[in-house]
Image: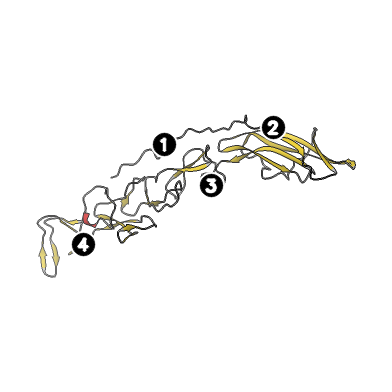
Amino acid sequence: MPNTIGQFCTAILVSTVYSTAAFAAASVTDAGENTWWNCTTSYGSSIAEDASLTPSTSTTGCSATATISYMARNSQNMSQYVQRKKTYCTACYSGYELTTVTATSTEATDCKVTWTYCKRICDGLVCEGKTSWTTISGKGYQTRCNTSTNRCEYSDCLSGYYDGGGKLIFGAAPNCKACPTHGECAGADNLPCCDVGYYLVNNNYVDGVITNQGKDYDCLRCPALGGVYGTTDNGCPINEPEPSHITRCYITANRSITETAGTYQFTQNCNYSED
């Protein structure tokens, strides 16, 4: 039986709550895009939220918020004005990072607003929002977002999987494949360990090389001779099958084998050979 592996990757200590010290408070200026409209900060209650400022119209991920209010006024008609406010984040929960963005409002004409919102770390990647090692269902590995690089990190293949190789991009997710039937897999770079009476074969081993498709292992039953199936010793392989480990299969000594010519026995264990 293979020994399971305990730790997949060396841990890197990262912060789970982001500091707001590097970010100034939100601000508003006149965009200078409309001759007749001017924009200034304003104060008051019951001011509507500015829904035109994207991509961050929600406060998802915010652990603390603040609000800035502003007013656009028509200089040719001082009674014509629009007031809006923008609620923004000043701190984020774990899995998010405080991000500064600037956009011009289409509701409060010519108001150019700068504010901060909470963006999920590793946005759009498989490790998005994952600040600790998380198992990806059906993939056979764990991932997390490195908050200092904003990139995904991956563990070795987990127990129950083997590394199929064939990965062409450095730092990409491992190609973990489910352990074959009649085998056990310890993960990482360990070869599958086939049950007694079965041998390992790499279906992608062609003409002396492992193809770019990587490794595709099966555990096949040892062939039979005269109705007697071969067996193997208990133990896990160390070397790659090229293309198979059929030579680990043998017919045990003193077993009666019956064929057309008659019944016979081997005087010692007799191993199979590659064709």
Q: Residue under circle 1? A: 10
Query: Are there few (<14), some (14-19), or many (20+) residues within 10 Å of tag 1?
Result: few
Query: Are there few (<14), some (14-19), or many (20+) residues within 10 Å of tag 4?
Result: few
The picture places residue 204, in percent across and down from the top left corner, at 35, 59
Element at badge 4?
strand
Q: Residue at x 54, y 33 (%)?
A: 16
User: On the rendered structure, is 3 left or right of 118?
Assistant: left
Q: Residue under circle 2? A: 25
Q: Residue at x 24, y 54 (%)?
A: 197
Q: Amino acid at mark 2?
A: Ala
User: On the rendered structure, is 272 left or right of 88?
Assistant: left
For marks 1 and 3, the one nearer the N-term is 1
* Inter-mark Cα distance, 3 to 2: 29 Å
Q: Amino acid at mark 1?
A: Thr
Q: Residue under circle 3? A: 125
Q: Nearer the viewer, residue 209 or 58?
A: 209
* Inter-mark Cα distance, 2 to 1: 37 Å
Query: Which disc, if any, is residue 224?
Result: 4
- Do labels 3 and 2 touch, CB within 8 Å? no
